[in-house]
Amino acid sequence: MSAAVPIWVAALLASAPASAALSTNPVPTPAAASQTECSRCHTCPEPSNQAPCLTACPRLALSAVLSPDLGPDVVILDELEDLYVPVRFDHKKHAVMAGMSKGCGTCHHFTPPNAPHPACKNCHPVGEPKSDLAKPGLKGAYHRRCLGCHREWDRETTCEICHEKRKGGPLGGTATKACDHTHFAPLVLKDLILFPTSFAVGDIVPFHHRNHSQRYERNCTECHRQERCTRCHVDNGEVLHPMGGTEAASLHDTCFRCHDGNRCKTCHGRDPAALFSHADTGWPLKAYHASLPCRSCHAGPGAFRKLDPRCTTCHEKALGLSRFDHAVTGVALDKAHRQLDCDVCHTNGLGSPPRCDSCHDDGRTYDRSRGFTPAKSP
Amino acid sequence: MELSRRDILASMAAAGATQVAARPSAASVAQRAADPFGVLVDLTACIGCRKCEWACNQVNHLPAVPVQAFEDASVFASLRRPDASHYTVVNRFPGAGEDDKPVFVKAQCMHCDDPACCSACIVSALEKQPDGAVTYTAWRCMGCRYCMVVCPFQVPAYEYFNATTPQVRKCTFCHERISQEGKLPACVEICPPQCLTFGRRSELLALAHRRIAGGSGRYTDHVYGESEVGGTSWLYLSGIEFSELGFPVLGDAAPPRLTESLQHGVFKDFIPPLALFGALTAIVRLFRPDGEKPPAGEGRQP
Amino acid sequence: MTGHGAAPVRKPLLTPGVLLLLGLVALGMVFAWVRFASGLGAVTHLDDRFPWGIWIAIDVATGVALSAGGFTTAALVHIFHRRRYEALTRSALLTAVLGYTFVAFGIVMDLGRYYNIWHPALPSMWSGHSALFEVAMCVMAYLTVLYIELMPIVVERFAGRVRLPGPLGLLDGVVEGALRFFDRTLGRVMSVFIVLGVVLSTLHQSSLGTLMVLAPSKMNPLWWTPILPLLFLLSAIAVGFAMVVFESLIAARVFGRAPEMELLTPLSRVIPVLLFVYLAFKVGDVMIRGVVTRLGDGSAASLIFLLEIGLGVVIPLLMLLSERVRRRPGLLFAAAAMVVLGVAFNRINVFLTAFTPLYATRRYVPSVGEVAITVAFISGLLLLYRVLVSVLPVLPAEEQPQQQRTGSRHVHAAPPSSIGRWSA
């Protein structure tokens, strides 16, 4: 059994004879190991080397949640090189998608505490797994990981969906170098989704999916968690599977992560044609502001939140007055006026009509509609 | 003189009987084998690629069909069974949930620990080998097809259109490969997701129970083949009930135990037949009516 | 066996009935040719789900059961010394000889590798755990015993009169010598063979029932029972006597003789007793195993089971309890026929009706070829019976049968001309 002790057991126990797989991973400290309960892996209170009484693979129990950016972008799988050209696996893309499902643990079912995810081949041997029947070989591990998800929406299980036959190889292929499958799964991004509900006042909740993902820059993972692949990938050209989690509670939870949940009519019964209007927030966008991207004002991290409507919210703190070009208001300031503080003219607050009479007593005025009325002749 | 003839006859019969009784039955061979091989099939990992069918055909010289032909998913429309030119077939069954993945089930000879076919075979053409395989020796076979009648898994198939040398055909467990060449069965070797695990049956059973107890919730608490008809070399793990996947619901008793106990009861050291013979002979002699000449004068002219 | 004065039947052989039988045999041989030329699949409706069809259920299983008259009458007359029935033994023996011979033919027809039929006899092939092995060995042995039992009849007919046609005449002396050898030796050991025949019959009649015990999960529980071998033995014993009555009455009718009611009436008194024992075990078995409730479910299987028991056992049992039935040839024939057909029905039910294989997409229905070959076997059996009773002293001599039975043991009623007619 010593040769068959799974890597994670060795890692957890931090035992002296580290296996080859271990050497590529930082060995966790005993302190880290002590944080893991014995019963996670052992079924008996006093496991020994001879009788480790292991549970089955702990899978998610030991998975850490790490950022997709920590992993490699592309992994070349080249263990079956004689028959096929290497498989180009877009790790980053899958890591992002996994974020909408079960996270890294979707594939990396084992990660020692305080360590990065090990590569598949760190634990799964190339060739037949003779020493430890419980652990599939690398071929099995790859295929189970890949096809476990892929066959959910892509019912094909032919080799060629991932492998390209090597030119002149035993299978009579034509390819000579790794192919770059961008993907065989059409991604369906709907503009508008109408959620039927049983709400009496308005039974339809229109959801502008593209707006949320593109205009409001919502991250997929903000809404999509624990999703099935088929939620986004067309299932063999057939109709999309029904949306996961159709219960009102789970959909509410998703929306309420950003939206205030107090006003039902915000969503229920809303005109599907009506896109978002900034005026609804009580702060209609005018002139210059309407042309700005949302992020110019809603710059902070997180959702688009209600901002302090005062100009200084942005113009003092975020942009700084010096960068404010008064000309966009239609009034270019001359050098003398540029020296003044804003409230010298705008005595009732920024944005309020300027008063000239705080300096000039010759009767000149400014009005937004009429512009300047010059001084009356003395 | 007459008595001695009878004695000779009786002793000849007895000699034959002892030899018959002394021949070990198939079951006892399997029981003696230290720990036969087996295969654990994890149905939750099978992707239905049918590469096992292709590999099986290659190794067993069954009709050579290009590998691409096995990518045709239309065969799943109807239930297929192993036949004379297909030792193993994969069938598709609906998954548990409405939009759940379908379940693919590989079918082949289960290689029972106490095989009814071997018990049935009149010429020991079917034999349980110590490595776990139930093998077929064509030159012994008479073609009575009793093995097909009794197989609880409906596996052996027959070459009905071979007029001269028809064979009973079924999975061989790649007997030569596993016992002499140290290789894996062809289907196990090729399986891309390695949902077939080859090993000692006892270890596979332990592994199967570890997986069930692992808490992943992937498996029903039933290792098919652990106890069915006395146990089989091939074992199955599934996420849904086996009865929904075309597996027959079978008891734990091995059918040969009943029939062989009946047979051995009737032929126990040939004593019951001899006792019957003796009793009837005694009746002939003791209850002979007066006036008849001994020996029972049959059809004889003086 | 000479005590009853049997003689070859002197009737014209080429009757329309015989010609019909010849035609049926010829038709069957056409299908048999196809079967041996192109395989079982070319003629039968057998497949991987239904490996056994009517050739096993009728030709073999029913054939063995209905040939039971040979050992039951032999036991009655020669072991239990009911000598008065000796007149019936030769006919029953011939039926058994022909029945088992055609069982062998049926097996050859059904075996995929018929040329290996001798394999079970090789010690290197012996498989003591197989019920079929036991059936095969016992049938082989019993067939041999049957032919030995038949020898005295041949000796009686031909000893001292061997005249082989043409050049074979040179062998007359050899054959004559062999017949004289049998004549000298067989008489001394015949009782051993008769007892042996009864023992072998007991063994294989029961083991034939063990065959299907090995497929419990594929059998309808109405018929599957661990005591199938016992039921097969009991029903075989019961049908043995019924078969003797049945064929004796048919022979009487066909040959225009008076039915031997003075023997058949007392003989048929034992049939209801045997039927009752069989019925008791059969009903008790269904009750004890708790499947009796299935009989009320209205399924086809339950109706067939009730039909088998009702028409094949209960009604003939009740009929044969009546002295009036036993005395009247017509009613006695009806009752005996019901027993015979009932046991045949039982064998067909056990081997075919009750057999419900897994994954079957259709039921087994015999093909035209299977039926034709089975009919040909039955026709051939009847034909051979008809020919052999014309050649050998099997049936009681017609002249004053009473007197002959009690009189001289050395009567040979067959005129020399009969053999000439047969060999011509």
Image (spheres, rainbow, N blue to C red):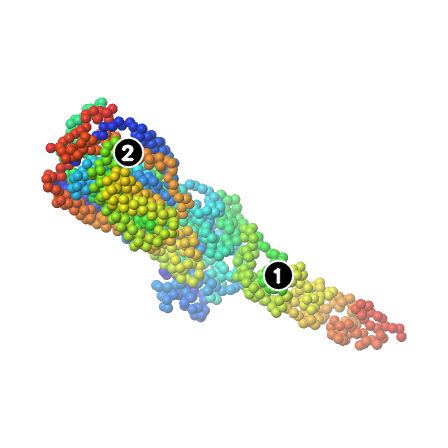
**Residue A185 point in image, percent of width and height:** 55, 52
Real-space Cα separation, disc 1 to disc 2, in angstroms: 86 Å
Q: Nearer the viewer, residue A164 or A243?
A: A243
Residue placed under numbered mark 2 in the picture: C382
Closer to the camera, C209 or B36?
Answer: C209
C17 sits to left or right of A296: left
Callout 1, which amino acid?
A: Ile
Between residue C57 and residue A91, name the one nearer to us: C57
Tell me the quarter of the picture where residue C308 sits.
Answer: top left
- Residue drawn at x 20%, y 46% is B273
Image height check: is A260 above or below B248? below
Q: Position of residue C70 (x, y in %)?
A: 22, 39
Seen as rendered, the residue at the extreme top is C166
| Residue receiving disc 1 | A204
For residue B169, which quarter of the picture? top left
Q: Amino acid at mark 2?
A: Leu
Q: SS of the residue at dot 1?
A: strand
- Counting other residues with Cα less than 10 Å from the Cα at mark 2, is it few (<14), some (14-19), or many (20 or more)? some
Q: Residue shown at 16%/33% (left/top)?
A: C404
Residue A203 image point, x, y percent: 61, 62
> Which chain does tag 1 point to?
A
Q: Quadrant of the N terminus of chain B?
A: top left
Image location of residue A202, percent across then percent down: 62, 63
Circle 1/circle 2 CB separation < 8 Å: no
Q: Chain of mark 2?
A: C
Q: Residue at x 22, y 23 (%)?
A: C167
Would you say residue C25 is visible in this rendering?
yes
Q: Residue lying furthest right in this view?
A: A378
Res. B149 in view: no
Residue A108 against residue B7 in the figure, above or below? below
